[in-house]
Image (spheres, helix red, strand yellow):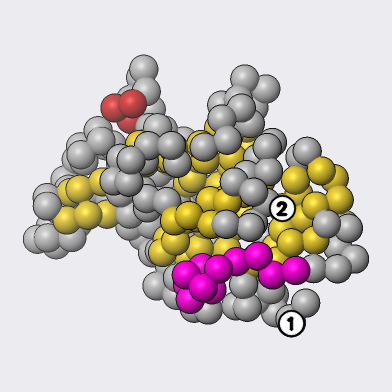
Amino acid sequence: MPSGGAYDLAGDPSNSARLFTNAGTNGVYRSDDTGGSWIKVSNAAMDALIGTASRVEVSVGMTNNVYVAIVGGVGRLTGLFRSGDGGGVWVALDLPTTTESGVVAGIHPGSQGATNLSIAADRTNANVVYIGGDRQPYVTEFTTGLPPWWPNSIGANDFSGRLFRVDASRAVGTQAVHITHTNTTSSSSPHADSRDMAIDANNKPAGIR
């Protein structure tokens, strides 16, 4: 395995001997013998993004489905990939966004993806993954430079958490949906700066700071 710091180490919940990690900026690797040996499983598109990455996160589902999120050197999510066969074939998924005053904002408006990134594969739907970023953008943030103007396009009234559900079975351009604010019963959200995420006993994502 090439040298380089690993940002994440993810185990397969259905196969205790299988692990996934990154090797610095060299790509994503898989072990089928609890780390005794490793093979590279990332493709060229992933490698191009990992080569300048400041963070890589991996989550493995219950049926050989794997998700990899990549943050570029600018501190923003640059790639989200899914494999349905344990890393054999990868497909790029939509990057979650909202539009504020005509400007598209991703999950890292604060450019803090190097520290604030979380991802968790749904435990019952192999096509679904949840992902969290740093904070909500305000309406005029990318246009006039004026002080915060709220609510933003999804009903946020402050710099709270930014979480999305991404469904690979949906058409490209419609895969990502926010799971906070206007898509909740009480227009709620967790704290900003999501650094880890877990799935609870009811198969609901819990953003953890």
The x and y percentages for residue 92 are: 44, 56
The x and y percentages for residue 122 are: 58, 34
Q: Which residue is mark 1?
A: 3
User: Which structural element holds mark 1?
Assistant: loop
The quadrant of the picture occupied by the C terminus is top right
Q: Is residue 177 above or below residue 96?
A: above
Left or right relative to 24: residue 162: left
Q: Residue at x 79, y 68 (%)?
A: 38
Q: Which residue is mark 2?
A: 10
Q: Where on the picture, by quarter, is residue 202?
A: top right
> How many dots with numbers?
2
Q: CA distance from mark 2 to mark 1?
A: 18 Å
Q: Residue at x 25, y 35 (%)?
A: 154
Q: Which residues are magenta?
A: 39-50
Badge 2 density bin: few <14, some 14–19, many ≥20, Cα 10 Å: some
Nearer to me, 19 or 139 = 19
The quadrant of the picture occupied by the N terminus is bottom right
Left or right relative to 94: residue 194: right
Q: Amino acid at mark 2?
A: Ala
Q: Which residue reaches farthest bottom?
A: 3
Is 47 one of the magenta-colored residues?
yes
Q: Residue at x 51, y 68 (%)?
A: 46
User: Which structural element holds mark 2?
Assistant: strand
Left or right relative to 123: residue 115: left
Q: Amino acid at mark 1?
A: Ser
The x and y percentages for residue 6 are: 69, 69
| Residue 159 seen in the figure | no
Q: Residue at x 67, y 22 (%)?
A: 201
Q: Which residue reaches farthest left?
A: 144
Q: Which residue reaches farthest top?
A: 185
Is 3 one of the magenta-colored residues?
no
